[in-house]
Image (tube, grey):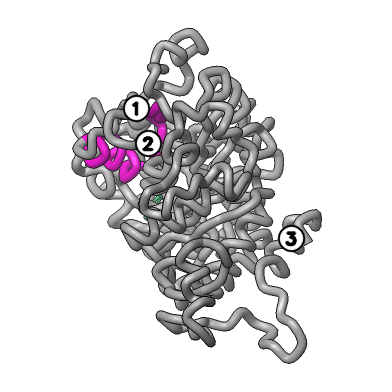
Amino acid sequence: MDKMKTATLCVQAGWQPKKGEPRALPIYQSTTFKYDNSEQMARLFDLEDSGYFYTRLQNPTNDAVAAKIAALEGGVAAILTSSGQAATFYAVFNICEAGDHFIASSSIYGGTYNLFGVTMKKMGIDCTFIDPDQPDEVIEQAFRPNTKCVFGETISNPGGHVFDIERFARLSHKHGVPLIVDNTFATPVNCRPFEWGADIVTHSTTKYMDGHACAVGGCIVDSGHFDWKAQADKFPGLCQPDESYHGLTYAERFGEMAYITKATAQLMRDLGSTPSPQNAFLTGLGLETLHLRMAQHCKNAQTVAEYLEQHPRVAWVSYAGLKSDKYHALAEKYLPQGGCGVIAFGLKGSRDEAIRFMDHLKMIAIVTHVADSRTCVLHPASHTHRQLSDEQLREAGVAPDLIRLSVGIEDSEDIIADIAQALEA
Ligand SMILES: *Cc1c(COP(=O)(O)O)cnc(C)c1O
């Protein structure tokens, strides 16, 4: 199954019912699971056997959806989380502890910027933000002896910058650390970061994967490629005995499954950002049409971006599908079938122009969300990124006049008609 094409994996991967079992993925709406004797249960707690015992750790519905995403990304294992934020936090916290350091691209989602720069700092984990467009020599200066990973977004939210995954994989590996890529906007339909050397992928499944704005969720996928034991001193959490599991060593016992097993057995056990099986089910349902929706999002967004680019009231457009875009060459390399449906642009005139434009839209709604089937719009400087200063905004690749337009899968003529009337008004 794992060798099949993306469209087939979207539809078929993850849940393969046996004789007489439900065709659709069942929602295992149960906190707990039954065993016949005490010994069976004890073996599960010792990680001697794999099996379900409590939904905070694992649930069959959640696991089937995680397996579908792992197959789509070409990874060895995956874990669902209750949100994209939880996925990002766990992905880094699974290998960083107090006193450690990591490096992140500054072109990332505002929530991630805050998590790394403020909240994780309070936990004693230091993050250096780098401008990903700087040359290698400048980026390499950010590495320290206690650096444990590098993080970037395939296509940044909201700026639409394309991350040079292969280059950052090379730099990360040169310094003995894994590259983590947030692949939310591209989705594995349009880019599979493992094929370019990334080691771990994260998702906010809330966006295109669910695709219908119904369920907040996240996912972490491991490629299984990173050799933790080759850097055993750097990664004691994976390479030294875990006292909370009777001295078990993840990298030894679980091989290429070590990273996800540790995230499940330790982080889910202790921090508990588990999705509800109901939400996992909705995400799984969304994934069945991901390949169809992504193609339509990209087609519509390309048409809308080209319309905006030639409009006299529009000051600038950032969409990597445009030939004029700064990231077009990277998009041709990493996103040959298209990137995503999200366009960033600015209007001529003052910052208030953006607010006036948005208030005149009729079909296109102002929502915090992005990347679902309905076209929507947001002004990050007034909304999602409110807490950032103008300088931090610019660092995060968010111009104060930036309008984020998430192009849906309606007819592009209707989307453009709504934009046209609002630009006139
Ligand atoms: C939305 C988003 C997140 C956070 O995900 P939630 O599901 O909202 O917690 C992380 N990364 C990117 C790129 C996002 O767009």
Give how far apart the Cα atoms at labels 3 and 1 are. Answer: 39 Å
Identify the residue position indicated by label 2 in the image. Answer: 96
Q: Secondary structure at mark 1?
A: strand
53 shown above or below 99: below
Give percent across and percent down for residue 157: 42, 42
Is 258 left or right of 138, judged from the image as shown?
right
The residue that appears at 55% across and 63% down in the rendered structure is 48
The answer to whether the residue labelled 1 contacts the one labelled 2, judged by CB atoms less than 8 Å apart, is yes
Q: Which residue range is magenta in the image?
A: 101-121
What's the amino acid at mark 2? Answer: Cys
Please identify the quadrant where the N terminus is shown. Answer: bottom right
Q: Where residue 138 sits in the image (x, y, percent)?
A: 44, 10
Where residue 38 appears, as percent x and y from the top left, is 47, 80
User: Which comes sooner in the sequence, label 3 or label 2?
Assistant: 3
- The residue identified by callout 1 is 101
Q: Is residue 403 above or below residue 420?
A: above
Q: Amino acid at mark 3?
A: Ala
Between tags 3 and 1, which lies in front? 1
Mark carried by residue 7: 3
| Label tally | 3
Residue 353 visible to the viewer: no
Residue at image position (53%, 27%) is 231
Would you say residue 117 sits in the magenta stretch? yes
Image quarter for residue 24? bottom right
Give the percent coordinates (x, y) of residue 145: 39, 17
Comparing 288 with 236, the one in front is 236
